[in-house]
Every structure is written in C-alpha cells, then in structure tokens.
Image (cartoon, helix red, strand yellow):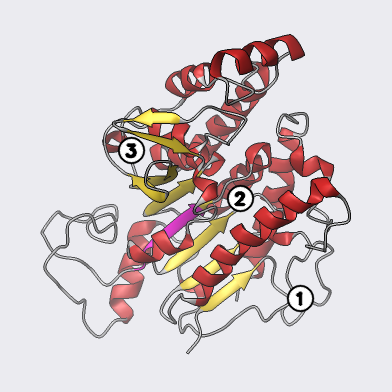
Amino acid sequence: MLPRYYLGRIRSSIRTTPSPHSPLDRPVVRGGQRKLQDFARLPPTATAELLERESDSARQQPPTAGNPQQNRRGGRPSSGYSYAVTCNAFVLGGGGVLGVAEVGMARALLEAGVRPDLVCGTSVGAINGAAIAADPTPEGVKRLLTLWDALADDGVLDSSLIRRVAEVMRHRTSLHGNDTLRRLLRDRLPAQNFEDLTVPFECVAASIERAREHWFSSGDLIEPILASCALPGVFPPVRIGDEHFLDGGLVNSIPLERAVARGADTIWVLHVGRLEEELAAPRFLWQVAFVSFEISRRHRFHADLDRVGSEVTVHVLPTGMPQRPAATWSNLRYRDTGRIARRAELAYDATREYLEALP
C-alpha cells in the first residue's frame, strides 16, 4: 500500500479549475485512512482527544528516549506513557534567500491550527526551523519575518566587491564570513540552546572529515545552524568539536526521512520552490553544475518519499510562484533580498488555499 501524500496544490479532482502554478502532475492522494479535516485545524489537545475517542483503546507503551510523539501534547502529564495521537512534523528545506517562502507557509499552517511536534531543518531551513521551534505561533512567525528583514538590512550577504575580495583573502575558501550572521542569530533568535526550544528541533550539516550527514539536537543552537547554512564558497566551513561542517543541503536538502525516523505520521514539507521547477537538459556550461546538483537533491527527496509507509501522510506545500525552468540566473542570485516580503506573501496565500481545499 502506497503512502498518502499531497504534492503542491489539490488537483482538478477537487477543484473545478487547475491552479495556475501547480507543480507536479501526479495523483494527489494515495493510501492513508483518516481525513485531515478531522484534525488539521484543531489545537494539539483537541487533536489528541479526537483521535483517542475514535480509537478502540489508547495504546500505552513504555517510553522511548527522544521520541517526539511522547508527552509533547499540551495538557498531557509526564506519566511515562505514549498516546496513540498524531505527530505533526515541519520539514524545512534549503535554498538561500528563497527560503523566505517557508515563512509564509509556516504562517498559514499555524493560523490554521497546525502546530508542529517536531521540526527538522536544512540550511536556511535550519534558521527558519529554529525560530518556529522556539515560538510555534503566528506571532512567532511574524517575528521570524523581521529576522529576514534584518538579513537584508544588516548586510549578511550584501557587501562591496572590495569587501568580498578582502573576505576571500581572509578566509581563502568563501566570499563571505559568518560573523555577521552569527551575531544576528544570537541577537534575534528567541533561544540559544536546543533545550530552550518549545518544540523538539534538529538540523543537519555535512561533515567534511566523515563525508556524512550529521544531526544536531542538543547543546548550543547557533553554531549548528551556521554549520547547516555554510553554503560552499559563500560561507566558510564551521568547526564544531574536531570536525568541520558544510551546508546540510549537500547531504539532505529536504530531510523528510529524518522526520519519519523520529516518529512523525503527518509531515508538512516547507520548501523554497525548486521542486516545482521543471528540469531540462543544460544548454550552456553554467547550467551543467546547477542541473547536476538539482538531480542529486531531488533524487534523495523522491527516494525518501517512495520509502514512506502507508501510515504516514506527507504534504508538499506550494510556494505560489509561477512555473519556470529550474536553471535560471535568478536561482543563482544568492544575495537577491529585494523580494522577501512578496515571496512570503505568495507562499502564505498559496498554502492557505491548499489547506482550505484539503478533503
């Protein structure tokens, strides 16, 4: 039995007309039993009570350490038992300044009453994910948007040619240092340690020495986020302990598999929009590396999606962006912060429409 998953917007089987920016042409609903309208807009405690009333019995099992499904619902006592309730996970992918779309998606979800029990983030999704895990409310998302405004205003990525040459001379491996971003995160994020977050959060980075993905979930929060965001050539590698780390997107650009492994059964994929873009054979030399990387990152995501069991529901949320080819110059403009508010608003409107159309 195949997993139940939703790709982008609800298709014409539910709508009378197709969406003008519908991403992927394949069936929307596969497998799964429960209609999401039963709990999508309910607060966490109401969701738990609804599912328990409909269950023949609430299964009680010995607790497993680190399981985000156990004792995460509001109003639940820490009794050492797990409850047969849904576990919502927000999975946030990488993509530089395009990641502001995830802020709009998160706003729509939280306003609809969909609150995460687990957050997993990669690259810029680590920044967004940490902020959401610290304050999973519509007000918290509004504060996250001000952080994005600060990213543009404080010049994290915007510097003169002379400054960039100086950074290359200093770091030798990157166009920018990460001191400004580090200071911004320490000043703007509501939490400085994983343990201070309201919701369990994990982020991934690529270990250079081990050539493996490495997940961070405890201790200091800022350095792991910087490691997850260390885009090669743009930011320098981040040293944590005896290892050096680069951008998590190199090894797991949309960490769907992690959320499944951590016990999530309803997963909301917040991404930057590249999944919606059409890939074609490269026509110019500069497109070759871009298309090759897109094949690699999408292959991992689709392989993870194919392995999801029938008991898990996956929603790939829409960005609201118009259809366009993937290999465009705009996707390489990592410093383009001029349309932050507009991208967030498009994703908010598209995701709200998506949620309203759910069966």
Check disc 2 and give the amino acid type: Met
Q: Which mark sits nearer the N-terminus, 1 or 3? A: 1
Classify residue 81 by image quadrant: bottom left
Kindly tell me whether residue 37 is visible in this rendering.
no
Q: Residue 8: horizontal and vertical position, in percent?
A: 67, 65
Q: Are marks 2 and 3 in contact (CB under 8 Å)?
A: no
Q: Is residue 11 above or below residue 155?
A: below
Q: Residue 298: horizontal and vertical position, in percent?
A: 62, 62
Q: Mark 3 = which residue? A: 197
Secondary structure found at label 2: helix
In magenta stretch: residue 263: no
Q: Mark 1 = which residue? A: 15
Secondary structure found at label 1: loop
The range drawn in magenta is 86-91
Q: Mark 2 = which residue? A: 105
Q: Look at discs 1 and 3 and give the one toward the viewer.
A: 3
